[in-house]
Amino acid sequence: MATSDQRSALGRARAGANFALIKYWGKADALLNVPAVGSISITLDALYTDTQVELDSTLARDELWLDGKRRDEDVAKISACLDLLRARARVTTRARVTTANNFPTGAGLASSASGYAALVRAAEAALELDLTPRERSIVARQGSGSAARSIFGGFVEMHAGVAPDGSDSFAEPLLEANEWPLEVVIAVTAKGEKEVGSRSGMMRSATSSPYYAAWVAGQPADLAAARTAIRARDFAALAELAEHNCLKMHAAALSARPPLVYWNGATVECLHTVQRLRAQGCPVFFTIDAGPQVKAVCAPGARSQVAAALRAVPGVQELLTSALGPGAESK
Ligand code: DP6
């Protein structure tokens, strides 16, 4: 374990983005970032964040470089996460964090999930810590709730937990990526950063949507049914559940005051296209997060048919495709 502040050390990591099939939307504790509901996600291999953490005793404060640009406005959040790990290592040295996403940042494509998961693994390496996967997930959660899931690959369940200190609020793997190799087509319908991020969006839903309490109350049943569908590799059951859960999350967002309409016209067209494909026998379902992009989850073999249909939707600017991938790894 590192004990001195007079050191410089480097850690590097890569983490895949994930998106939820059963969504996280709402917090039980904003300070510890404990979610109000559990969630189930898939981790992707083709969309990822690469992060380097360099401890540098000449720095007076942490420094963040994101996609080549210095981001002083985001340093406080990164520092809070690094502080949790520095405290464990009994080190106060500041760090230069250099991070890059290979996909559009902040447009509802889970950049905070892969970002904090990669940060935790890179900082752990730089600080010469040896955390358990559960400990990594708990630290990543405090950076961003969805990041707790990107610590693991394949199908992942996040437990909301009940402990006041957040010690039982962590993610765990359900199935490895190769145990049910689903594929994903993402229809990008708008580029650029979203107007209302997940954090303030979920707060607004919790404090002003008349549907929020029903959203939270329904989650345990959706989680149990999704767990069963995933273990049974029951695509039809998972498809119905994931779309239902996604639309419930958006109902809580749409009914907030002021309303949160994350969709554009192309988002809705993609949603109809996916439903039409499934009605014709193509094994695909959609999910949508706090942004206008549509994520189409395909059974093995359906990807090219789904991609061709989504490419033809007016307003779709770009398609990204991915298989399921591994959890965050240090490099
Ligand atoms: C709609 O993990 O970004 O993508 O914990 O405040 O950082 P914070 O929120 P974040 O929220 C993700 C919300 C979501 C659904 C999901 O990923 O489960």
Image (cartoon, rainbow, N blue to C red):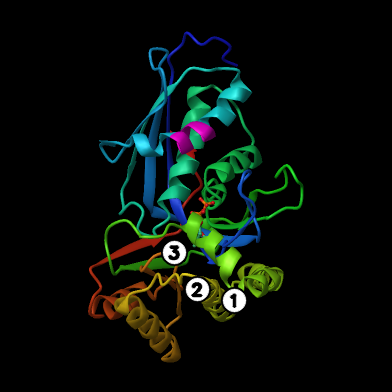
Residue closest to the eye, 59 or 12 = 59
Cβ of mark 3 under 8 Å from ligand 1: the answer is: yes
- Distance between the alpha carbons at the discs numbered 1 and 3: 27 Å
Q: Is most of the magenta stretch helix, strand or loop?
A: helix
Q: Is residue 101 magenta?
A: no
Q: Is residue 78 magenta?
A: yes
SS at circle 2: helix
Give the extent of the magenta segment. 76-81
Nearer to us of marks 2 and 1 is 2
Q: Identify which residue is drawn at 57% across, 68% down.
A: 208
Q: Is residue 66 above or below residue 85?
A: below
SS at circle 1: loop
Residue 221 location (% of width, % of height): 71, 73
Q: Identify which residue is drawn at 58% across, 77% down.
A: 241
Residue at the limit of the structure toward the right, as seen here: 163
Residue position marked by numbered label 1 in the rendering:
234
Q: Name the residue type under label 1.
A: Asp
The disc at residue 250 is: 2
- Residue 321 as seen in the image, left or right of residue 80: left
Q: Name the residue type under label 2.
A: His
Residue position marked by numbered label 3 in the rendering:
290
Residue 330 location (% of width, % of height): 47, 34
- Residue 329 as seen in the image, left or right of residue 189: right
